[in-house]
Image (cartoon, rainbow, N blue to C red):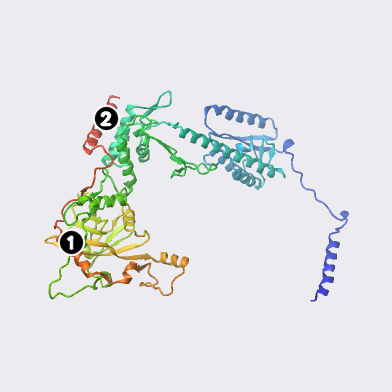
Amino acid sequence: MSQNEKIPRQIDKKSKIRERYKGIDESELDVIPAIPQEDFYHGTTEKRVAVYARVSTDDPRQTSSYELQKNHYTDLVSRRPDWKLIDIYADEGISGTSLQHRDEFLRMIDDCNADKIDLIVTKSVSRFARNIMDCIGYVRMLKGRKPPIGVFFETENIYTLDANSEMSLSFIATLAQEESHTKSEIMNASIEMRFKRGIFLTPALLGYDLDEDGNLIINEDEAQTVRLIFFMYLYGYSTQGIAEVLTKLGRPTKKGNTKWSPGSVLQILQNERHCGDVLARKTWTPNYLDHKSKKNKQDRNQYRQRDHHESIVSRDDFIAVQRLISNAKYGNKSILPELHVVKDGTLRGFVSINPRWAGFKVDDYYEACLSAYEDGVIPDDCDLEIEANEGDFDLRGYEIAHGQFFDTPGRSIVTIANDEFKFNMPAIRKLESSHTVELLIHPEKKLLAVRTVSQEAVNAVTWSKLSNGKLIPKAISGTACLPTIFKLLGWKDECKYRLLGAARKKGKEQFLIFDLNETEILIPRYVIDQAGAENGTDPDLAPFTSKNSESILAYPQEWGDSFGSDYYAHAKAETRADSSPWDITIESEPYKEPDIKVTDRATIESEIETMIEQMKETNTNE
């Protein structure tokens, strides 16, 4: 159709539309009138009325406001013959920015949903809710019911079933929410100023009373309970075990409850006030609307004052308890561990690995290792000279190939993930005289050693077990220690590392040694796929494993330029190893004095017995 033909058609359409919208004569229509909306202020239909009242704090001085609200609205309802009071729903000591703990408000909404209520009356928008989403959301939900339920805000004179009410309500609700925000900011600023000046909150705490100036003063009877809790935990009791003993002894909590729980014991153990310190702002509230507190991980300033008041337990004992608590999930139940190192013999400089302790850092391993050598200097293998005899082959330029390039059946293998060590069956067989072994690492030489020890050894771990009469490997959990080991070696947490080991033997004594530099890497396929998606995959590169494998086998980049280590460098290392004094039984020992002076075990044991006897005598006399 040409442009000339389109224009007349469009003019014709517009003409017909204009003619249609002229309408018809009103006398030709029958109008059925709507039922007029009842006047809220002069209604005659009986309404079932709910009254909602709230005060934001449980301060006794707010009780008058609370009671006045209830009395006022009881009188208000009674003056309206068309209103019937169903109930007064009142929350006392509850914030209006969140529905959390507003049990009466939620009960009122449930009654609305059960068709028990036609109208809600409250003092103001801020009493109903200071959160604009809650306020508008509930008003719309109630308005949308059949029949609709209205809310009357007396102060603002807003009735939500009026057609023009929502704009006014939204504006006032926004102001109410912002007022709460402002109050929250003012309160936070006030708290910050107090803490900066060392003015701390001193809530009720077991072991202390408050004097007339608000200072913490030791309550000796309660302090005995606190000391018993700390000493029992240091001795090796669990929080559950301590709770059972305290309950049996009838020792009261600060609130007078004689039934203890592990949680209440843990709160005592973690409160720094028992060692005389104060740490302010352990938690903070990110959102003033929901009031949910979070642990303060340097999100806000914290303030610590040492020796703020008299202590019940020593600071060193308190620190030791915190370290034990942080490592309890790894199975620690005894006194504070120390880092041990072998100071002589074949395994000189090797540091004993405690798989259940996460408190040691990379620097601790290096310091422990170097403490085994004179002036902290490790002898250099390059100082040795290899002498060539007449007729010997000249092997310069030759290499000892990596064992991983050959078939490895019967070879000792350990696979290390970021949470466990797993040895294979050949490794177990080489040291099958014991189910328990000790793992040792030389952080400078990057070597891992395994030797048999008794079950009573400090860092003994079980690496094998019997199943249907057969010895099989058992994974060694390293969730606590391996993150530090991975950091020490520069390994990636998402990968696994597989190492070939060798047995060093003299007479009946032997141990396994693994070179942590000579490792195959098992990379999860998702890591490769993710890297390829981000950087683009090289079409010339292909994994050794099949496409269905969960992991891809990789080797260190430097292996691409050689088959292994230089023959003479390898010979020097072997000569050095063979020349060292053979003795693999020398026990590891602490490499330095501990950084804290924990009460010794004998004193702890004696104090526990004495305190329990005294508490039993007190119960008998009462």
The answer to whether residue 542 is left or right of residue 173 is: left
Instruction: Judge by depth and name the residue closer to the eye, 250 or 296.
Output: 296
Residue 418, quarter of the rendered image: bottom left
Looking at the picture, how far across and down is residue 262, in whole percent? 35, 40
Q: Quadrant of residue 17?
A: bottom right
Q: Nearer the viewer, mark 2 or mark 1?
A: 1
N-term mark: 2 or 1:
1
> Can residue 468 be seen in the rendering of this structure?
no
Residue at the (36%, 35%) spot, across then down: 259
Q: Secondary structure at mark 1?
A: helix
Q: Residue furthest left?
A: 507
Evaluate whether residue 612 shows in this view.
yes
Quadrant of the image containing the N terminus: bottom right
Q: Check residue 162 in the rendering and tell me which mark sits there, or answer none.
A: none
In the image, residue 220 sits, relative to residue 507, either above or below, namely above
Label 1: which residue? Answer: 577
Q: Secondary structure at mark 2?
A: helix
Question: Amino acid type of disc 1?
Answer: Ala
Classed neighbour count for the residue bearing mark 2: other residues with Cα under 10 Å, few (<14), some (14–19), many (≥20): some
x then y, percent, for residue 27: 88, 54
Q: Nearer the viewer, residue 37 or 449?
A: 449
For the C terminus, the quadrant is: top left
**Percent of width and height locating residue 136:** 63, 45
Label placed on residue 616: 2
Decide: is 584 above or below 118: below
Q: Residue at x 54, y 27 (%)?
A: 61
- The foreground one among 562 and 123 is 562
The percent coordinates of residue 210 (x first, y second) are 40, 26
Pointer 1 local density, CA inside 10 Å: few below 14, some 14–19, many at least 20:
some
